[in-house]
Amino acid sequence: MAKKTAVIIGAGPAGLTAAYELLQRSDYRPLVLEMSSYMGGLARTVNYKGNRIDIGGHRFFSKSDRVMDWWQAIMPLAGQPGGARTISYQGSSRSIDVGQGPDPETVDRVMLLRPRKSRIYYSRQFFDYPVRLDVATLRKLGMLPSVRIGLSYLKSVAFPLPEENNLEQFFINRFGAELYRTFFKSYTEKVWGVSCREIPAEWGVQRIKGLSILRALQHAARNLLGNGVQSRNTETSLIEEFLYPKLGPGQMWELVAEEVQAAGGEILTGQKVDRLVVEGGRVVAVEAIDLASGERRSFEAELAFSTMPVKELVPSFSCQVPPDMQEIAAGLCYRDFITVGVLLSQLRVPLLQDNWIYIQEPGVQVGRVQVFNNWSPYLVQDPSTSWLGLEYFCNEGDALWNLDDRATIALAGRELERIGLIERRHMIDATVIRMPKTYPAYLGSYQRFEQLRRWIDGFENLFLIGRNGMHRYNNQDHSMLAAMVAVDNILAGRTDKANIWQVNAEADYHEEK
């Protein structure tokens, strides 16, 4: 008897997790339809002449034991220099033993344990991120700015703003107005392209959660007392180590795709889904156009999972979509992303150990710089070179997005030299990657999104998962958990989908307890 088919739109972390979970735990046969030619979605790895690019940077760290165990079942942890040790997670009975795994010099299918270091580059100086109010930071800022920051923070503690209707108010209540203006305002507005006063406070709740100066100081004190390397009770922004696939995040999802296909699932690439056939309140088929041949195909579906942008999903319904639902979907906003990979013979600033550098310098468009050598040394073909990723935030179709590759590379070189990180004469090679709809924005019609969600959830066998599928600024572990919970519901016969939307909203899934 033929297995029932679950059609999954998108081969990113959420879609591939759903496919894998269905194969491991049910009698459904997953059919994954992916528009691109690669696996991993926003967590793909681009191989450019042997140098690999992690688009956006993906730390493999989660407060969910389920996700951590899942990752390590696919890719074991590599052996570590210096012998075995145990990383304990405070507040949890579990731990990770490191030091006994495969040798990454001879085996590719391994996860590395990597140190985390992120800094802010401001006024030609490096500041720890998250910001530490320690002697080094205060000395770099100078006496007067430091006093203003301290007094401003004390004011926010003693007299917090009574309402947090926008992101500016959210930041000020946690960091004080002076620190917000110094280290948060310009970068955040560069990312989203609008004033922090126009961004709902919900974005801060979603991404920063309980992080504050007080939490950062408490975290530093715990480290001094030696209470463990990582903690379930530690803000994700504060962890000092994380797991990372030897060849970048895309390696994880390429391996999962292989496992899915080996277990009987099917993955078709180059398929643009543009129609969901609905009958009796259920999705009965998904139609897609083969981008290579132009052929339209229809795939019967007992279940349907969507990770495609909600803005594109809603017009694809074959049924009559209520005008207000069409309006909400059409009004959803996204922020797009450009990565410029720059290969250098040397840096002007030596010994950069950062994963990310947040660029707060005025007068440049670059928002963040990745040093791929520090994510994994195996991302770089020649270890004597420096392999950087410059991250630009833009809107699809705007002037920056429409620059040709040559002009974009020239811009990247000029800006790196202008802020003093490189000399352009040391540039060996470069490439440009554009990623549309990287960040679902809490702008436009988002304040009405709950209405649209309830309408879509009314289709019993359709499950929205993933960052764009849920129009939520999830990390990849949240996207995976949403897929796992959706499969849990299917196996349990649960039709209410509220628990899927509670992922990255409930305390259990939060980056704070």
Image (cartoon, rainbow, N blue to C red):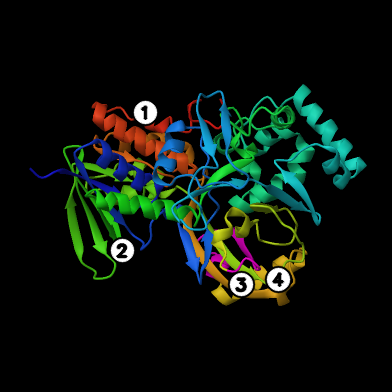
* Mark found first going from the N terminus, 1 or 4: 4
Left or right? Give the position of 472 relative to 380.
left
Left or right? Give the position of 256 relative to 179.
left
Residue 62 in the image: state x and y as whole percent: 51, 37
* Mark found first going from the N terminus, 2 or 1: 2
Q: Residue at x 23, y 27 (%)?
A: 493
Q: Which residue is mark 1?
A: 498
Magenta highlight on residue 389: yes
The disc placed on residue 409 is: 3
Q: Rounded to the nearest whole Å, what is the CA distance between mark 2 and mark 3?
A: 28 Å
The amino acid on which the numbered mark 1 sits, given as a three-letter code, is Ala
Mark 3 neighbour class, 10 Å CA radius: few under 14, some 14 to 19, many 20 or more: many
Q: Which residue is mark 4?
A: 414
* Local SS, label 1: helix
Q: Residue at x 76, y 61 (%)?
A: 350
The disc placed on residue 270 is: 2
Residue 263 in the image: state x and y as whole percent: 24, 48
* Local SS, label 2: loop
| Among the 4 quarters of the image, the one containing residue 346 | bottom right
The amino acid on which the numbered mark 2 sits, given as a three-letter code, is Gly
* Local SS, label 4: helix
Is 73 situated above or below 335? above
Residue 249 in the image: state x and y as whole percent: 48, 52
